[in-house]
Image (cartoon, rainbow, N blue to C red):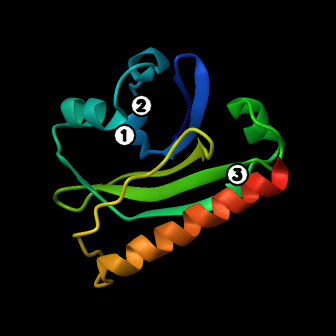
Amino acid sequence: MKLERLRTLDGTPTAFIRTWLPAELAEDITPDELRDSSLHALLSERHGFRIAGGRRTVRAVAADFALANLLGVHVGAPLLLLEGVTETDDGRFVEHFATWHRGDLIAFDLIAGAASNGVRSSTRVNEARALLARAADLLDETS
């Protein structure tokens, strides 16, 4: 099942989230339940599992017409796209998601001490710095 949500901060759109869930997890979720709450907390409470996390990637993308309209930016504005898969602590698939964040309002903080998938954390930090530099370049080009 596909869920789509627009997140705002003080009425300003900040992120658009598209989530795919197994039907058995999503069948009884209502839009009102997700308005001001965590999907993970709702799923954990309702189905009795613990979210363990999963793989995440972040990359800079340009807003297309639909995303620009949803997020209140111009076409081509820089967005940070966070994509990932979430699993339970026993390895069950929970979701696949894509979240487009406004590059002018949202930043990601990274913890430099942790390694992921055998790649040194300093490499991850350098990749993130390069990504943020590219997002800044895109912003300059569209201004």
Q: CA distance from mark 3 to mark 2?
A: 34 Å
Task: Name the residue: 40% across, 71% down.
Answer: 125
Above or below 8: residue 17 = below
Element under disc 1:
helix
Q: CA distance from mark 3 to mark 1?
A: 35 Å
Q: In the depicted view, which residue is nearer to us: 77 or 25? A: 77
The reply, left or right, for residue 2 in relation to residue 134 is left
Q: Nearer the viewer, mark 3 or mark 2?
A: 3
Q: Residues within 10 Å of mark 1 (few under 14, many from 20)?
A: few
Toward which corner of the image does residue 4 lie, by quadrant?
Answer: top right
Q: Amino acid at mark 1?
A: Glu
Residue under label 1: 24
The circle drawn on residue 57 is none
Q: Amino acid at mark 2?
A: Glu
Above or below 121: residue 8 = above
Q: In the depicted view, which residue is nearer to us: 70 or 114? A: 114
Q: Are marks 1 and 2 in contact (CB under 8 Å)?
A: yes
The mark total stands at 3
Q: Residues within 10 Å of mark 3 (few under 14, many from 20)?
A: many
The reply, left or right, for residue 126 in relation to residue 87 is right
Element under disc 3:
strand
Task: Name the residue: 31% across, 38% down.
Answer: 40
Residue 75 image offset from top left, x and y in percent: 83, 44
Q: Are marks 3 and 1 in contact (CB under 8 Å)?
A: no
Above or below 135: residue 71 = above
Toward which corner of the image does residue 16 lie, by quadrant?
Answer: top right
The circle drawn on residue 27 is 2
Residue under label 3: 78
Q: Amino acid at mark 3?
A: Pro
Residue 59 image offset from top left, x and y in percent: 58, 63
